[in-house]
């Protein structure tokens, strides 16, 4: 893998988009302080996932966005893209090229991309984790990080070695495992609390459930008897209803006759009443007409009087309007005469104004013809003359400059000729030395190649042995992991047993204090041994009885109960050996069961138990049969006439009496006490076998390690010989590269001098040409200045004459302007007066028209009033005649109505008599209906009772139940059943379902507790495995780095020795690392006692050692050699070159020795204030020169 390119835009001082290409070997980034070199390192660190603004030399993350300069505005986005070649699949992505992009907006929003696909910061961090390329890895090393190596505490220094060992992911995983462990323990505590709470509920609910089942049985018998009694009562009520129905029919017949007589009377009454209503309506109508006639007569008479008054007023108003119209006509005549006079004066003033405007315009034209632009012309000519004078001066200055420059170029050309000769001689000498060194280098390289081939063969053989060792170790660790899990599970199960987990709270407390209480033998589940295949069957057969406590006698049981009551810590069932008797199947029943297919045995015979508790176990299980499956159990139960319980291996039950219980619980049988007991026994045997196997594997691994160690000693000897040859090769390479560099430098200088010589000649020729052009320009400019001066004299003479004539015309214009202003003022006043008179005339005309309209309207109204007055007189005569006719007709109708009212009174008396007779009949009928309704209600109530209570119709109830005894006996039986139900007390029917629900939940939580315990064990095992892996990797890498460090240190220092030591070798997870160094000529001492330069160089030696042990594709060094002197910088640069074949180096530096070893140089400058720019130089000329020489 290789770092190919970085694109930076808006990051710190890189305001514009900047692309930097990285090549093989060493790339050096140089530039003055403050130019932005280190911003490249920080850009790479940032894109790899750095989240601390402080580590990027900022106060907050927004500080990395370009904030503007004197000439530039701030930008709103910082973006960095890193392009990596991934042909060798170094990173676990199936791409040959990977791009990583990070963006930060000024509003704080961040974006991350992998190959232009949006992703999370975590994805980028995970991608580079333990690759040696992370933001905190040893592949990015700054001067501050070098200082931190020798300034930090030994414990802090180990992080560098952990990164090299690639154990960071294990530490992160362990941290996550610890978090999960905490969560698991919290969940386990919560589950344990709930189990504790449920343990106190299960037994009471079991008792309530049993009571509820008895209640339902009594209720069923009561229901059958109740239904039969209801049927008898309904039949008797129906007989009573039929008798009431017959009586009611007789009453209805008599009522019909009375209704007919009553109907005839009512018909006559209706006719008479209708006639009376009509007469009443006719009287009311005539009375209303009479009132209306009187009102209309009085209204008409009033209208006639009003018209007489209105005619009088109209005559007076018409006389006043005629007088007003005469006055208006006189005003109109006066205003028309005034307006005519104003119009004549206005026309005269307008003519005078026109004549004055004509005179003023003529004077103005005459003044314009005299003025012209003479002054402006003179000024322009003077400006042009001054400009030509300045140009003349500039040309003369340029002529002097060219004379001086021409002399300097001639002197420079002479010096360049001398330098060319000297450089050619130096290049010839260096070429001869270079050829000699190349020959010696070729011989040394052949010898190194031979040693390398031998080393590689032995290394390959050793690698195969290491691979085999790793496989054996892996198998050993797998076996160790399984063993640890088994041991942890065994310990967990032992803890559960010791804590009596799974037992009810009361049982648990008694068993824990059985020594104190005395007489306690143990719980049933503790004392029996159950085969694995029969676990579920025995667990179901015993049920809650598995937690019953076997005691010596009744006194021991009473003491236990008393203890539970005092402490209020639950309930328990005690089984005294002195009172419990054994129960067994009769031989005949057992033989019948054995003859059936699927019979497995009697439950008490399938388990093992101490002889001392045999009576209790036989009491509990002596009559329970175990069958293979439910079909077999059904057959056996039928054979034994459903008198005994049959349990299957799957936990299904055929109960005595024929009921069946079955299905599947959520937890199966995993949480049962018997399963846990059997699992503990099985684990003990497995652990013994695994320990034997593991001991054999450890012996194999130990033997292989000894063989590998011998092979590595042989390899180290060969490596030392090869290292000496390589040092000689490196020395020759350094000499050849020094000569190559000199040759290259002299060649560049020769080219530069030759270029300067040629440039001087061209410059001299250019100066001569410029001097000739300047002479011509000076002559041309002098002629032009003389012409401009002549034009200025001529224009000044003409201007004086024009000034005199212009003064006379100005005086005439002023007089005309005064007269014109006076005329305009008079015109404005006259126009205002004209407008005022016209407005008055118009208003007077409108008023005249309005008066004429009003007079015409009053004349028309007067004629209309005369006609209306005549019509009202005729109408009054007609109304008087109609009024007399209405009064006569009204008197006649009232007499006829009085006779009709007498006849109505007679018919109403007869109707009252018939109604009284009808009322008595209705009362008798109502009594019969009430009796029927009561019977109906009684029947309906009983039918509703059957429907609501039992969901039966009468017909269904009659068919389903019949009363086989007398009503009295049935009533007595119902009473007894009700008494039995009352004796049960408060019954919780929901306890049946609640018990099943709580029991299921209890079983489920027991299973959950087992799962959480297993998860806890698994997490402890995982954490131990990760610790072991970290120890192994850290130990191996530390040994390799320590060995390399002891080799690299003397090579870089030119002697001396150094070593790495663990501060706590017994604790590899937390041990610190001490660096002990002995530079040439000094004593062995700790790093803190060395000088600043020695400490820095020691830290750099450690860095190179880490890279040799854990090579990385590329490494970024930011001024790590700043504290070194020149000699050590040269050593640093040469040693750096040894790695450029395997590792790509990007070095930010100020030092010449480092720059000399670079293949590519990038210069960072600030041509514009506050903005970094990149200049690159590819240093490949040396190779070209070498090819040309050979």
Image (cartoon, grey):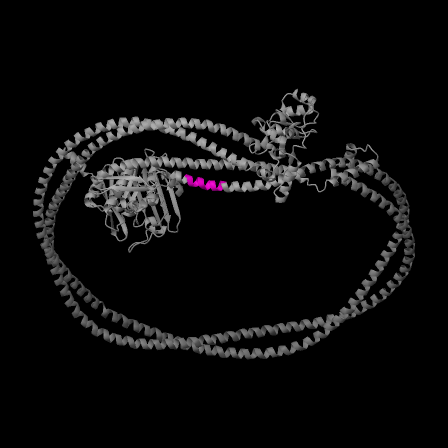
For this view, does 708 lie left or right of residue 858?
A: left
For this view, does 615 lie left or right of residue 457?
A: right
Q: Is residue 24 visible?
A: no
Residue at (34%, 34%) from the top-left corner? 89
Percent across and percent down for residue 357 are: 32, 73
Residue at (59%, 79%) from the top-left corner? 323
Percent across and percent down for residue 751 are: 13, 42
Depicted 794 relative to depicted 976: above or below: below
Answer with the quarter of the image where residue 550 lies.
top right
Residue at (85%, 60%) from the top-left corner? 279
Percent across and percent down for residue 71 are: 28, 55
Q: How many marks?
A: 0
Depicted 458 relative to depicted 984: above or below: above
Identify the image quadrant of the N terminus: top left
Q: Is residue 178 magenta?
A: yes
Residue at (68%, 36%) from the top-left corner? 210
Answer with the quarter of the image where residue 1051 lies.
top left
823 or 302, nearer to the observer: 302
Percent across and percent down for residue 585 are: 68, 25
1160 or 205, nearer to the observer: 205
For this view, does 379 lie left or right of residue 175?
A: left
Q: Is residue 876 magenta?
A: no
Q: Identify the main secondary structure in magenta.
A: helix
Depicted 541 relative to depicted 129: above or below: above
Q: Is residue 962 visible?
A: yes
The stretch in magenta equals 173-184
Identify the image quadrant of the C terminus: top left
């Amino acid at each position: 893998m290789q770092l190919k390119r970085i694109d930076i835009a808006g990051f710190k001082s890189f305001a514009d988009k900047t692309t930097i290409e990285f090549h093989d070997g060493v790339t050096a980034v140089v530039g003055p302080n403050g130019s932005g070199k280190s911003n490249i390192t920080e850009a790479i660190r940032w894109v790899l996932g750095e989240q601390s603004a402080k580590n990027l030399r900022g106060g907050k993350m927004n500080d990395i966005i370009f904030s503007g300069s004197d000439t530039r505005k701030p930008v709103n986005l910082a973006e960095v893209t890193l392009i990596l070649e991934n042909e060798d699949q170094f990173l676990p992505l199936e791409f040959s090229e990977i791009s990583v992009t990070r963006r930060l907006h000024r509003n704080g929003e961040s974006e991350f991309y992998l190959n232009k696909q949006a992703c999370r910061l975590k994805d980028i961090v995970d991608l580079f984790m333990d690759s040696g390329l992370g933001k905190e890895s040893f592949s990015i090393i700054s001067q501050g990080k070098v200082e931190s190596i020798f300034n930090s505490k030994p414990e802090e220094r180990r992080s560098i070695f952990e990164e090299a060992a690639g154990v960071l992911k294990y530490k992160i995983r362990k941290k996550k495992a610890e978090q999960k462990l905490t969560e698991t323990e919290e969940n386990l505590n919560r589950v344990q609390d709930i189990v504790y709470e449920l343990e106190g509920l299960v037994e009471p609910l079991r008792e309530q459930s049993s009571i509820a089942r008895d209640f339902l049985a009594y209720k069923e018998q009561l229901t059958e008897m109740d239904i039969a009694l209801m049927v008898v009562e309904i039949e008797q009520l129906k007989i009573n209803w039929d008798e009431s129905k017959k009586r009611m029919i007789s009453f209805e017949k008599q009522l019909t006759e009375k209704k007919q007589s009553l109907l005839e009377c009512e018909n006559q009454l209706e006719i008479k009443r209708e006639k009376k209503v009509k007469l009443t309506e006719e009287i009311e109508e005539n009375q209303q007409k009479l009132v209306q006639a009187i009102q209309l007569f009085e209204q008409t008479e009033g209208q006639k009087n009003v018209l007489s008054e209105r005619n009088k007023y109209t005559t007076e108003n018409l006389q006043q309007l005629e007088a007003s119209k005469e006055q208006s006509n006189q005003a109109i005549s006066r205003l028309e005469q005034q307006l005519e006079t104003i119009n004549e004066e206005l026309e005269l003033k307008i003519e005078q104004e026109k004549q004055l405007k004509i005179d003023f315009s003529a004077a103005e034209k005459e003044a314009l013809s005299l003025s012209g632009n003479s002054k402006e012309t003179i000024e322009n000519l003077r400006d042009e003359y001054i400009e030509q004078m300045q140009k003349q001066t500039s040309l003369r200055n340029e002529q002097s400059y060219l004379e001086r420059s021409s002399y300097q170029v001639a002197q420079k050309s002479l010096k360049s000729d001398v330098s060319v000769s000297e450089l050619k001689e130096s290049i010839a000498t260096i070429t001869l030395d270079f050829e000699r060194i190349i020959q010696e280098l070729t011989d040394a390289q052949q010898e190194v190649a031979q040693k390398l081939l031998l080393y590689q063969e032995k290394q390959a053989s050793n690698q195969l042995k290491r691979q085999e060792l790793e496989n054996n170790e892996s198998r050993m660790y797998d076996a160790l992991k399984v063993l640890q899990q088994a041991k942890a599970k065994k310990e967990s199960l032992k803890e559960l047993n010791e804590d009596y987990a799974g037992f009810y709270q009361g049982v648990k407390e008694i068993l824990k204090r059985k020594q104190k209480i005395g007489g306690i033998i143990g719980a049933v589940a503790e004392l029996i041994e159950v085969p694995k295949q029969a676990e579920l069957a025995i667990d179901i057969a015993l049920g809650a009885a598995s937690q019953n406590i076997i005691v010596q006698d009744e006194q021991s049981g009473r003491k236990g109960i008393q203890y539970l009551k005092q402490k209020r810590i639950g309930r328990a069932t005690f089984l005294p050996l002195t009172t419990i008797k054994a129960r067994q199947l009769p031989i005949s029943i057992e033989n019948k069961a054995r003859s059936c297919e699927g019979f497995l045995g009697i439950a008490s015979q399938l388990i093992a138990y101490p002889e001392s508790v045999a009576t209790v176990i036989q009491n509990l299980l002596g009559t329970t049969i175990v069958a293979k499956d439910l079909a077999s159990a059904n057959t056996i139960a039928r054979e034994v006439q459903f008198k005994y319980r049959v349990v299957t291996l799957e936990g299904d039950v055929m109960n005595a009496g024929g009921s069946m219980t079955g299905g599947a619980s959520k937890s199966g049988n995993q949480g049962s006490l018997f399963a846990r007991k059997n699992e503990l026994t099985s684990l003990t045997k497995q652990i013994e076998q695994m320990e034997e196997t593991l001991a054999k594997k450890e012996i194999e691994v130990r033997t292989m390690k000894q063989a590998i160690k011998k092979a590595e000693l042989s390899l180290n000897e060969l490596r030392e010989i090869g290292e000496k040859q390589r040092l000689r090769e490196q020395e020759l390479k350094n000499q050849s590269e020094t000569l190559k560099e000199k040759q290259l430098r002299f060649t560049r200088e020769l080219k530069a001098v030759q270029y300067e010589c040629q440039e001087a000649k061209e410059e001299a020729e250019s100066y001569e040409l410029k001097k000739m052009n300047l002479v011509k320009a000076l002559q041309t400019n002098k002629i032009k200045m003389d012409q401009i001066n002549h034009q200025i004299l001529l224009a000044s003479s003409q201007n004086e004459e024009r000034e005199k004539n212009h003064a006379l015309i100005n005086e005439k214009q002023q007089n005309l302007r005064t007269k014109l202003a006076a005329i305009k003022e008079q015109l404005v006043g006259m126009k205002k007066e004209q407008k005022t008179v016209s407005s008055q005339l118009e208003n007077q005309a409108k008023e005249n028209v309005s008066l004429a309209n009003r007079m015409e309207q009053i004349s028309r109204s007067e004629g209309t009033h005369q006609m209306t007055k005549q019509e009202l007189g005729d109408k009054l005569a007609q109304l008087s005649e109609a009024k007399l006719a209405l009064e006569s007709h009204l008197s006649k109708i009232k007499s006829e109505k009085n006779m009709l009212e007498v006849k109505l009174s007679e018919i109403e008396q007869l109707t009252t008599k018939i109604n009284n007779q009808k009322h008595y009949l209705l009362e008798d009928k109502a009594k019969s209906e009430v009796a029927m309704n009561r019977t109906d209600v009684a029947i309906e109530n009983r039918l509703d009772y059957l429907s609501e209570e039992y969901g039966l119709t009468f017909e269904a109830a009659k068919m389903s139940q019949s009363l086989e005894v007398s009503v009295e006996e049935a009533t007595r039986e119902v009473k007894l059943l009700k008494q039995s139900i009352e004796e049960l007390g408060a019954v919780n029917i929901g306890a049946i379902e609640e018990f099943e629900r709580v029991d299921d939940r209890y079983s489920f939580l027991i299973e959950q507790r087992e799962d959480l315990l297993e998860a806890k064990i698994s997490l402890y095992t995982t954490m131990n495995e990760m610790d072991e892996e970290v120890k192994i990797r850290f130990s191996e890498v530390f040994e390799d780095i320590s060995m390399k460090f002891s080799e690299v240190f003397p090579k870089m220092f030119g002697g001396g020795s150094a070593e790495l030591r663990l501060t706590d070798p017994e604790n590899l997870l937390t041990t610190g690392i001490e660096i002990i160094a002995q530079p040439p000529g000094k004593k062995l001492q700790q790093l803190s006692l060395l000088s600043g330069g020695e400490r820095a160089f020691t830290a750099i030696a450690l860095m190179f050692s880490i890279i040799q042990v854990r090579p990385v594709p590329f490494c970024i060094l930011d001024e790590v050699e700043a504290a070194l002197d020149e000699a050590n910088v040269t050593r640093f640069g040469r040693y750096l070159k040894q790695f450029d074949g395997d590792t790509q180096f990007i070095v930010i530096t100020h030092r010449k020795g480092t720059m000399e070893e670079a293949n590519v140089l990038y210069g960072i400058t600030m041509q514009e204030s506050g903005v970094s720019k990149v200049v690159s130089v590819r240093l490949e000329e040396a190779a070209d020169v070498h090819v040309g020489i050979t």
